[in-house]
Image (cartoon, rainbow, N blue to C red):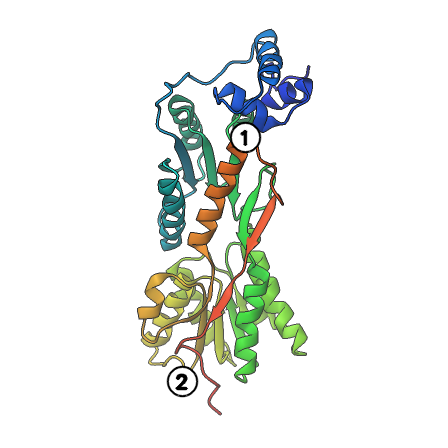
Amino acid sequence: MARDARGKVTITEIARAAGVSVPTVSRVVNGRSDVSPGTRARVEDLLHRHGYRRRPTASRDRAALLDLVFNDLDSPWAVEIIRGVEEVAHAAGIGTVVSAIHGRTGDARQWMTNLRARASDGVILVTSVLEPVLHEELRRLGVPLVVIDPAGSPALDAPTVGATNWAGGMSATEHLLRLGHRRIGFVAGPPRLLCSRARLDGYRAALDRAGISADESLIVPGDFYHEAGFTGCAALLDLTEPPTALFAASDQMAMGAVEALRRRGLRVPEDMSVVGFDDLPEVRWSSPPLTTVRQPLAEMGKMAVRTVLRLTRGEELDSPRVELATELVVRASTAPPVD
């Protein structure tokens, strides 16, 4: 039987040898009752023969736990995801442990140590990339994993929950085109993120459909935070021919752009229309209220919990990738360009 780099048998190999699914082995490992006696005996025999090390045994009345792991917790959209996760988890009687690993190997390893100690029943990973060895440890422990909107290339062999970022980028740009704008600036998100690249591709696709060649001078880099929107908008305003509208790949960058315009004595939308992406709760109270693409962040959190619960029950998923629909929300920050 194949073993991992440290010579330990994996739960995947146990499942293959027993002729059952990985979730079935996970149920046996975690002492769940919904496994037939024959299957349980076969799996238990393989676990014993190959020296599979179980997680610390918890008491039968141990509260069920779910780990929710972010890179960072300094963004309002993280709160929206937590809200969705907590709503479904609470209804199912499951506690939620929220962690941030800050993209650091040491923090990720400490989180894994804590995970083993508390014997969580599932993990939801939000825009984070784990080292292969840590991902393999999750597989070995039989902990179901779901990724929300994976960062970079989705290297983790795990179900994912995301949003229709390409369609959202296209709908935002088409809205500005319908209003009559032809020079539309774009403040991009981090290029390493799939969602960022999809929003930019949607922007380009909408321009192409309208017969407009994308002007690379109108595309400026960003990182989803206010400062990037502020500096990106300032750079666009410094062009010989500034854009008449701006699409920012996040609401926070859109709000930064609005502030850059205000400091130059320019008005939204009279002097420049602005569109964001996310539909965070505060943007409806901005001045003016922000037109944006609604990303169903709370619903993504809810779907991730439901997916984890299905995996813990050993159910087959309809698809390993779920994309929830985005929606353009038109408010007062967009208008036709002034001649």
Query: Which element is circle 1 on?
Result: helix
The numbered dot on residue 271 is none
In this view, the residue in front, 223 or 149, is 149
- Amino acid type, callout 2: Glu
In this view, the residue in front, 114 or 161, is 161
- Mark 2 neighbour class, 10 Å CA radius: few under 14, some 14 to 19, many 20 or more: some
- Amino acid type, callout 1: His
Name the residue beneath numbered marker 2: 270
Residue 316 appears in which quarter of the rendering?
Answer: top right
Which is more N-terminal, label 2 or label 1?
A: 1
Left-right relation of 290 to 218: left
- Relative vertical location of residue 157 with respect to residue 189 in this rendering, above or below: above
- Mark 1 neighbour class, 10 Å CA radius: few under 14, some 14 to 19, many 20 or more: some
Image x and y of residue 86, in percent: 36, 44
- Relative vertical location of residue 280 with respect to residue 150 in this rendering, above or below: below
Question: Which mark's residue is nearer the viewer, 1 or 2?
Answer: 1
- In the rendered image, the residue lying farthest to the bottom is 339
Residue 328 seen in the figure = yes
Left-right relation of 58 to 162: left
Taking the spot 40% from the left edge, 69% from the top edge, the residue there is 257
User: If the image is split into quadrants, where does the N terminus sit?
Assistant: top right
Image x and y of residue 291, in percent: 43, 72
Residue 127 seen in the figure = no
Residue 171 appears in which quarter of the rendering?
Answer: bottom right
- Relative vertical location of residue 107 with respect to residue 235 in this rendering, above or below: above
Name the residue beneath numbered marker 1: 135
Taking the spot 52% from the left edge, 71% from the top edge, the residue there is 172
Query: Which element is circle 2 on?
Result: loop
